[in-house]
Image (cartoon, rainbow, N blue to C red):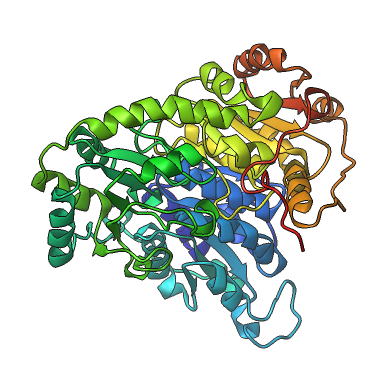
Amino acid sequence: MAYTVGELVAEFLPAVGVDTAFGIVSVHNIPMLDALSQRNAVRYVMARGEMGGAHMADAYARVSGHLGVIFTSTGPGAANAVPGLVEARFAGSPVLHITGQTATRFLDRDMGTVHDVPGQTEMLASVCKRAFRIRAPQEALATLMAAATAALTPPMGPVSVEVPIDIQRMEVQRPDWSSIALSIPPALPPEPLALSAAIAALRQAKRPMLWLGNGAKGARDAALRLLDLGFGAVSSWNGRGIVAEDDPRTLGGLHGAGSPPVAEFFGTCDAMLVVGSRLRGHETMEFALKLPRPLIHVDIDPAANGRTYQPDIFVQGDAALTMHAVADALGTRPDGLQRDLAALKPRAVAEYARGLGPYESFPATLRATMPREALWVRDITISNSAWGNRIMPVLGPRDAVHPVGAAIGPGLPLGIGAAMAGKGRKTIAMVGDGGFALNLPELWTAVQEQAELVIMVMNDKGYGVIRHIQDHAAGRRFFHDLQGPDLMQLAALAGLPGMRVSAVEEFGPTLEKAFATKGPVLLEIDMATIGEHPPYAPYNQARKAS
């Protein structure tokens, strides 16, 4: 019996450990998805748009720690996936994007065939870590293996593979899948001379801090060893939960930007070990946050050296191997830093929460109400920028997902992808009404898949973050009010439970009810009745005169 490239693609995915994929069926991927449907080895989640599907695959990768897979058609379909691929690149997510292409006899000739977009490969290469094209059936397996390996090799990122429609139908030898395995490079040991310099500097430090980023997500045990030696810790917003944030030795995402007590505390520290973090401008007040010196930066990527903050010492190497090596070489530090950190933490969190106005109690109420193992997904709504990234405790390294690229709109599909990866764990996705509108059709994806997802819409009837930026930058507001649907009527139309919170005291009890409900729930927080959310730093500062 004939065996085609489309069938090879369908069998490749479970052979490398993929059990869920996302996307939209279309003219240029039918052979692959037909083969996928006939095997019943991969759950296929039908997104309503390629952008939403790509965000779902991204969140699935972040929560599962393995490949997130998105299928699109060629041309406009592939282009629609670009925002999700861009976000996956920001987040360092191993996403495998499998797309069609026009038939090989028309390739790169700009002949106007269906969905043929000139420069598709270059477009995908510009937003992905790599972009591949299968040019002959005999190349299919090797190309898929190379693409998946590239996605999963640190620093991880999205990778696209184009499979021309005629090649999908061509015959190929069926592989022996029992002998197929991805060959991910082994963890890179730290560079010896730089490691020795880092250890020598840290031996002199009595009050060292550890800054953990996304690249340290698999290094919890090593990080805890350093904390046991007397280090304190903070996290980038994409590295939260590596140390559970109910541990008094970490400040989590309250890492100084917008928190004067933490920024002042850094002035009492005498070293900072940064592991697997970009130290992004978005999180450091465009690099104005003063960090302790000496600054020692550990990263698998040599390009990280001096990309943002100039380190005193740069160590190229795997996060876990490097921190274990440092811990092996150091003795216990004095306990003064951790004692001071434990005293600072509740004071800094309480001071920060007081700046949230009527929403002061929301972070603590949410953490107390949601199941400990629940997943915490957010959009770039004002509530996330103000408190979701900073003081809502995250307890596991793969428990939290947010748009690292700071785009509005991914929250709902990110929530769906996280819920699919959670395998029954409850997920809550906090979105603003503006961002919710951008991927609103994915509400029906959540219903069709019966995702264990609470969709919490912070509804201020407009672009709340933009209002405060406009106040700060221009002294007036414009193009910010949005007319949207009645969310309770929308919930009824979509066929899922709808709940509304119109007062602060209703938040906890309504959350309990939402988490106790099986399947997706639409939870509206009526900010018009509760009150406007105050601006967060730096937009809570006096506007400079023009």
Q: Is residue 527 above or below residue 51?
A: above
| Residue found at the far right of this picture | 483
- Is 344 situated above or below 14? above
Residue 201, image x, y percentages: 17, 55
Looking at the rendered image, the quarter that the C terminus falls into is bottom right
Residue in front for this viewpoint, 535 or 372: 535
- Taking depth in this image into account, of 58 and 4 the one nearest to the observer is 58
In the rendered image of this protein, does residue 311 appear above or below residue 11? Answer: below
Can residue 248 be seen here? no
**Is residue 198 at all visible to an observer of this figure?**
yes
Q: Residue at x 51, y 51 (%)?
A: 283
Residue 278, located in which quarter of the rendered image? bottom left
Q: Residue at x 44, y 69 (%)?
A: 140
Place of residue 200 in the rendered image (x, y in percent of width and height, measured from the top left): 13, 56
- Residue extending furthest toward the bottom: 109
189 on left or right of 27:
left
- Residue 4 image offset from top left, x and y in percent: 49, 64
Q: Position of residue 110 (x, y in %)?
A: 71, 86
Q: Residue at x 65, y 84 (%)?
A: 106
The picture quadrant where one finds residue 195 is: bottom left
152 or 136: nearer the viewer: 152
Looking at the picture, tell me which residue is in the foreground, 212 or 50: 212
